[in-house]
Image (cartoon, grey):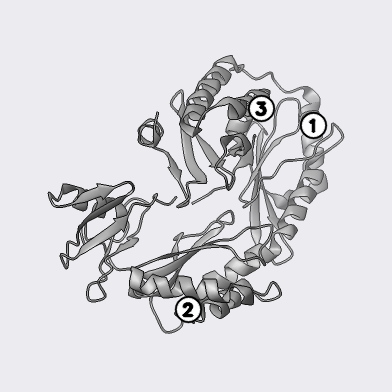
Amino acid sequence: MDAQGMLHQYPLLLPQTLSGRVYDGFITSQDKDFRLRVVLPENLQLQNARIECSWQLRNILQGYQHIVKQRLQHSSDLPSFMVELKTLIDVALKNADSIEASPAPQYYSCLVKDIESLGWDKLIFVDSEFSTLRLKIEDSTAREHVINVKLGARYPYKAPDCCIDLPVPFSVSWTPQSNLQDLYKQVLSTLESLKDFWDALDEIDKNTWVLEPEKPTRSATMRRIAIGNNVSITIDVDPRHTTMLPECYFLGADHVVQPLKEMLNTNIHLWDPNVGLLQNLKDVLEIDFPPRSNSEKSDFSMDCGICYAYRLDSAIPDQVCDDPHCGQPFHQACLYEWLNSLPSSRQSFNIIYGECPYCSKQDPEKLVPLSMTMQQTSTIA
């Protein structure tokens, strides 16, 4: 199965970076969609890939982790691995016990005692069976977070499943003597370790026009920031190393983007870990981002010149005609269909050549993967 076949077989699992290192989306098994994220290393070797998933899928694959790792080592490519992972999930679901044992009588008394120790004011939801809880937690900077806790019948002897909107994997360190207060403290410690990361992105969200994601979650590490009309920079920040230079790539016409690339390469030595992320971007690129105080987001959000819409599913116009007198943006999907339909267009590897719908200028348009928002996942391999 080639990449095109994989897209057909797994249409909900999409590439997130130009290099094809990160895939994010869903895998479907028995009419159920499970969140999945595949992160390949720099050399794109599948053997060293990191597989992350939602707590539901992680729970289903509990006991199968060694098989997942084994398949990573022996699969020839990502499409082949996905076929085997899908088969493994199907088997795990069939083998799962459909009826969970009823909780022991001491389950409820133990749980109520744990909630009382933690504080009832931190409980924002509990289902009728006392098996699913939602707890609120506030970090030292007054950011509010929600912890989703799924308890099994063997609580507290078996660790609960915990899900929280974080940019890094989170797993609970648990013993039979542990309780909800221990879980709460572990989450709080993780939140404090991410303070600088959220401070940096909150500053960007407050002082620049962020085009994507439209409503960033706490797990989102990427921001597409408007620089000017039809030109933007996308940064992907490492939550564990916020002071380091993030992954950067530019979107816009070549005659606008090329000087920015050259400026970044020339001034990269000016990046100062002791200076904030936003100020570093300004210093290295030698620009001022359009302020929110005297501009509107619509100033940088031109509709696609083919479908006349700004948002197409989750995508926004990210292809721009390179003619300085045109500069019309298009959705990648719209532009590809347009150029592919022209008798005069031609394709060479991953570049298709054709005429701009607006200025009829012969101009190459690179095919890049569409973009989608992460959500929080848990590592399984």
Residues 331 and 272: in front is: 272
State the quadrant of the N terminus. Answer: top left
Q: Neighbour class for label 2 at 10 Å: few (<14), some, many (≥20)? A: some
| Front position among marks 1 and 2 | 2
Q: Is residue 28 left or right of residue 165?
A: left
Nearest to N terminus: mark 1 or mark 3: 3
Is residue 208 among the parts visible in the rendering? no
Residue denoted by label 1: 156
Nearest to N terminus: mark 2 or mark 3: 3
Which residue is at a point 51% across and 77% down the rendered structure image? 285
Is residue 284 among the parts visible in the rendering? yes
Q: Secondary structure at mark 1?
A: loop
From the top left corner, tell me how far across and down residue 324 is, in percent. Answer: 26, 75
Label 1 to label 3: alpha-carbon separation: 23 Å
Residue denoted by label 3: 65
Which residue is at a point 54% across and 27% down the rendered structure image? 75
